[in-house]
Amino acid sequence: MTDSLLLGGHRLVPLACGALYWPAQALLAVADLHLEKGSALARRGWMLPPYDSCDTLVRLQRAIRQTGARVVLALGDSFHDPLGPARLPAQARQMLAELIGAVAWTWIAGNHDGVAAGQLGGAVADDVVVAGIAFRHITDPAAEGPEISGHFHPKTRLLNGHGAARRCFALAGERLLLPAYGSYAGGLDISRPELVAALGQAPLGLLPTARGLVFVDSRTQAA
């Protein structure tokens, strides 16, 4: 087994927490943090524990510390809605400020939050290209070259589609989807036709484990 993959000729390391690390660039990419999803749902009467933002940021803090990343790309939908930054609790706000102050941080605009996250500091962009790899929120079927994106919250199952659903990376040619990083973010099975259509082919699911990456053929999954 291996703990990494090659994309555009570059070695990338999918982490068990759902982040993607690029050692040569000291770059950590995460997608779909969906901060303050709990408070958004509470406004609609779904009374969930209001700790999702802190939990998500603690895991991100740990990933940055363990990898030594100096660059962070947040690939869109970092907040569950455009008003999320205003609802961020003081503790989570302080944690986020410390993270943004410690690395070169870029928010990529998502369909849920737009550019709202930029008011908290860091750079804001629609997409970013690093050493020939494009980072964006939603995969662009018309774009050429290697690409890393989020949006679809890929998940998969082991045991021929009958095991517990787990968040995963999804690889289709030179397109890589990152799993949702947010504690309350849901998921879409990699066998679903809308995900296959967006990628242009059935993807492989990539599950990081202590022994390396486990590859799951999406065609074996139950929809």
Image (cartoon, grey):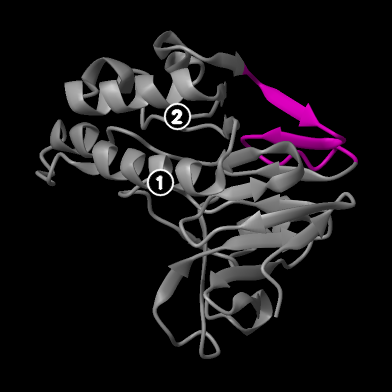
Could you say which is closer to the camera, residue 219 or residue 178?
A: 178
Observer able to see residue 108: no
Which residue does the numbered mark 1 point to in the structure image?
A: 62
> In the image, residue 66 lies at what x, y percent?
49, 49
Q: Residue at image x 36%, y 25%? A: 96
Observer able to see residue 127: yes
**Residue 165 placement, left or right of 72:** left
Camera-near label (1 vs 2) is: 1
* Quarter location, residue 190: bottom right
The amino acid marked with disc number 1 is: Arg
Q: Residue at image x 88%, y 49%? A: 8
Label 2 neighbourhood size at 10 Å, few (<14), some (14-19), many (20+)? some
Q: Is residue 127 magenta?
A: yes
Looking at the figure, which quarter contains the N terminus?
Answer: bottom right
* Quarter location, residue 57: top left
The magenta stretch spans which residues?
Answer: 125-144
The amino acid marked with disc number 2 is: His
Tag 1's secondary structure?
helix
Q: Earlier in the sequence, mark 1 or mark 2?
A: 1
Between the C-alphas of marks 1 and 2, the distance is: 25 Å
Which residue does the numbered mark 2 point to in the structure image?
A: 112
> In the image, residue 22 lies at what x, y percent?
70, 46
> In the image, residue 88 lies at what x, y percent?
24, 23
Q: Is residue 135 magenta?
A: yes
- Total marks shown come to 2
Q: Residue at image x 27%, y 22%? A: 93
**Residue 192 placement, left or right of 62:** right
* Quarter location, residue 216: bottom right
**Residue 216 placement, left or right of 143:** left
> In the image, residue 138 lies at what x, y percent?
64, 38
Taking 144 as reference, is 4 above or below it? below
